[in-house]
Image (tube, helix red, strand yellow):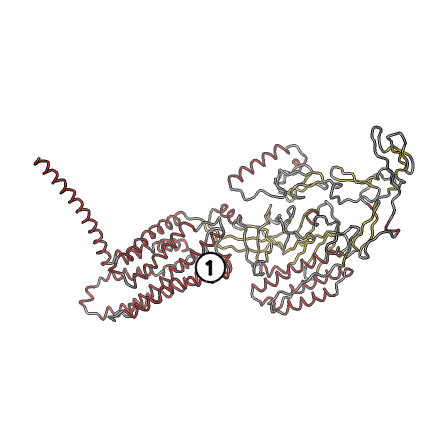
Amino acid sequence: MGKGTPLRGLSSPFKCVSSFARGLLVLLLFPMGPTAQNSKACALQCPPKSSCVNGNACRCDPGFISSSGEIFTDPLESCDDINECGPPSPVYCGSSADCQNTEGGYHCTCSPGFEPTSGATIFQNESENTCQGDGITSWEEGSTNWKVRGHSEERNLIRPGQSLTPFFVSPDVDECNSGKHQCDNSTVCVNTVGSYTCHCRQGWVPKPGFRDKQMTTICEEILFPTWTAPPGIKSQAPSHFFKRIQDLGRNFSSASVLNTVRDLLQEMGDLLENPRDLKTLPLSEQRFVVTNLLFGLENVLRGVSKALPKGSWTFSSSAGIEVSLEVQAPSYRNITLTQNRTEMMLTWDTVHDPGDSGLAVVGLLSTPGMHRFLAEAPLVLDAEEPANLHETHRGLLQETSHILLSDVISAFITNKDAENLKSPVTFVFQHSVTPGPRQKVHCVYWERGQNGSGHWDTRGCWVTSTRDNNTTCQCTHLSIFAVLMAHYSVQEEDPALTVITYVGLSLSLLCLLLAALTFLLCKAIQNTSTSLHLQLSLCLFLAHLLFLTAIDRTENKVLCAIIAGALHYLYLASFTWMLLVGLHLFLSARNLMVVNYSSVNRFMKKAMFPVGYGVPAVIVAISAASRPRLYGTPTSCWLHSEKGFKWGFLGPVCAIFSVNLAFFLMTLWILKSRLCSLNSEVSTLQNTRMLTFKATAQLFILGCTWSLGILQVGPAAHVMSYLFTIINSLQGVFIFLVHCLLSKQVREQYRNWLRIKKTKAESENYTLSSRTMSDCKHSEET
């Protein structure tokens, strides 16, 4: 198994097989171990040399580590001994001493020829080193034995049968005390056996191109990192804050680092406690400022904390902002930081840069005041999350709302590559809210976003366990984290509605195709009205066809976005042509008594194509340019509901069916007055029922019945869903029925087409029979 790579994202059958195989292997491998007996309350069977953490994770014992780090959830992991003495060795026993690795630990012993003056034969580090001796002073000529003289006795260094080239070791020369070193003034000389190294002073770091603890090391004093105000924001509260930050930067020195950290937290706490006009800014600008504050404070703390002395530090402000810092030399031991009901666990090999022998810093910052600015920020789920939720609920995911369960915390380390950590970092968040059946807890981090205003994201973080009052997360990167609970409104799938949708749209596709062919081929009815209905039929046909075949093609995000954009355009174009049909109907009724309709026809011919296809194109272009990532959702290729993006479709649609309803009512009023003014002979020729039916059908053709979608609330929502689905999926049927089957001219054209076919068939039959008769007569004569 790859290092630090959990098995996620497999299909459901493979998940089941994988879980069963792992459980079986755990029973076979660890049935009798002490850990198995002592972790009955643990959901995970921990291997030897480990113990259970939070009920469903394992932690290696001190001195041991797994391939995934200190904390792991894979039962097939094993805890192996850490070789503290192996390269790169973080253990320094001092001069004249050697490191000896043991299972789960290590110890130091004096080198051959040296003995401890304290009498302790083993010790742990350089500070306990008391080794002294004269070194190798004699060689027994003609023998294979080295004679080593210590303080009390002579003893053999090499057993008989071994041979080495003779050499002599003289007592070590302390270059640091004798002044024979060449360390720069910015460093401190540290003596080693036979040599020396130059260490940066407290509060200093190596200059670019130099490394610490080398003979050529040159250092420079730690500087206050650059932190500037976000551009384009006009607000007095942030401006005052950044002026104070500039003052702290000018007065900063490594000697004043403790006061600087305290002042930083206090200034941030004052701003969050009393944001003043910051709260009056638009939400996007508020989040833009807060994103700058979060990442800026993290960057400054990461920089100035290197000037802190070695050890553990905790700072806090009166507003509740707190930071815990661990400043240590690189080692293999694990780190646990706790801050405001949040715990972070990681290993030191995750913290420091490879090859950096200087001090490493890890910090955990809690900013409770950020909650008010980030609680309602948008949430972007990883691609796997909606699929898992859909599989769990067996329904269609609708709108989501979420609340923050924890404080906003920031985790940072001196390792510059915090985006791709060697092993995942574990967080344990305490919270008081218990998730419900349609609520899911997410481990999220704050993503800057393209515009800098930021959003919550789940990529690279996952929940390993969640209980009533705590959630355990693991992340492969460090950033600004929180735990939030999302509430999913899940619309359970209705098989009947699905059948009605597919049958109705399929029938509409057939009718729309027949209607379009009729409008194209039937010359007797070709006019402005049929041209409008032809374009409406074509747009509806393409929209329904794309909806049936590609609405759920969410595997490829780019393709899904293109499908969503095409559906957006085709349905908007369909509604725009419905608007033009309603306008033409109203203008025709208004000019009913006018013999010459040329003015209406000229206006419609000039306006219909630019309006019918141009207006939808402009709306879609503006939507795509402003928020292209909101085309396509995790469950369907349609518009995302985030930031009211769906109103790019709903707004024009609501406006069109409102205008069309007004056109329809005015048309009925005009027709009523005109029909009343006609003489009785003409009125008796009118089929009242047919006119009433056609007028009513115009409501469906003009799209006014889409208003039923607004009424899908409350107790009548289920009934309205059925009415909306049935009526609007049959829109193509109404167009074919009213403008084709109920048109006398079209029916006559259909009869002519059928008569021609029938005549041709009869003619062919007559010709065939005539030939047969003639052949028969010819045979009789012969």
Query: Which quadrant is home to the C terminus?
Result: top left
39 is higher (above) or lower (below) than 659: above
698 is higher (above) or lower (below) than 511: below
Image coordinates for residue 53, horizontal then vertical, percent: 65, 43
Q: Is residue 470 left or right of residue 645?
A: right
Residue 472, can we see it? Answer: no
Image coordinates for residue 706, horizontal then vertical, percent: 38, 59
Q: Residue furthest front?
A: 782
Residue 126, can we see it? Answer: yes
Answer with the quarter of the image where residue 446 lies: bottom right
Q: Is residue 422 left or right of residue 757?
A: right
Image coordinates for residue 129, horizontal then vertical, percent: 84, 44
Q: How many marks?
A: 1
- Observer-nearest of 510 and 779: 779
> Residue at image x 40%, y 58%?
571
Query: Which quadrant is home to the N terminus?
Result: top right
Q: Residue furthest top?
A: 161
- Observer-nearest of 214 and 445: 214
- Observer-nearest of 448 and 647: 448
Image coordinates for residue 83, horizontal then vertical, percent: 73, 40
Pointer 1 residue: 646
Determine the secondary structure under disc 1. loop
Q: Is residue 386 left or right of residue 171?
A: left
434 is higher (above) or lower (below) than 251: above
759 is higher (above) or lower (below) than 12: below
Answer with the quarter of the image where residue 691 lies: bottom left
Mark 1 surroundings within 10 Å by alpha-carbon count, few (fewer than 14), some (14 through 19), many (20 or more): some
Q: Residue furthest left?
A: 781
> Residue at image x 49%, y 51%?
557
Q: Amino acid at mark 1?
A: Lys
